[in-house]
Image: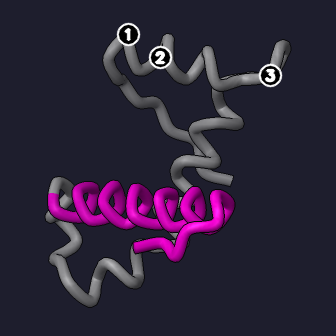
Amino acid sequence: MARTTLTYEDDIDDWIENRLVAGQNRTIWLRYAVETIYSVDGNLDELFEPYQYDERQELIEAAVRKEVERRKNEVNGGNGE
């Protein structure tokens, strides 16, 4: 199994720490993040070059926002539009 070391801002580390259940290692969350991107990256390849990280991130964020709003509207009895 691959192992890696990475560096990121302290505020991101604090944010990750706040997402974990007591006693959970941040490696769990980092694995979740990598596996999540891995699962959608093939779809993004249809629109972007592999190195276009900002564009990929922007699309992912927009798609998630849209889907969250749709589901919230669904729960609240709206039509999602």
Q: Position of residue 4 (x, y in %)?
A: 50, 38
Question: Distance from label 2 to label 3 (Cα)?
Answer: 15 Å
Q: Amino acid at mark 1?
A: Asp
Q: Secondary structure at mark 2?
A: helix
Mark whose residue sits in front, 1 or 3: 3
Q: Secondary structure at mark 1?
A: helix
| Whether label 2 touches label 3, CB < 8 Å | no
Q: Residues within 10 Å of mark 1 (few under 14, many from 20)?
A: few
The residue that appears at 21% across and 57% down in the rendered structure is 53
Q: Position of residue 5 (x, y in %)?
A: 46, 30
Question: Distance from label 1 to label 3 (Cα)?
Answer: 19 Å
Mark toward the start of the polypeptide (1 vs 3): 1
Q: Is residue 70 above or below residue 15?
A: below
The residue that appears at 40% across and 56% down in the rendered structure is 65
Where is residue 64, by image quadrant? bottom left
The residue carrying mark 1 is 10
The residue that appears at 16% across and 54% down in the rendered structure is 54
Read off the magenta span.
55-81
| Whether label 1 touches label 2, CB < 8 Å | yes
Where is residue 10, by image quadrant? top left
Q: Amino acid at mark 3?
A: Val
Q: Tell me if 69 is positioned left or right of 19 in this view.
A: left
In magenta stretch: residue 43 = no
Return the mark for residue 21: 3
The residue carrying mark 2 is 13
Colour scheme in the image? one colour
Q: Secondary structure at mark 3?
A: loop
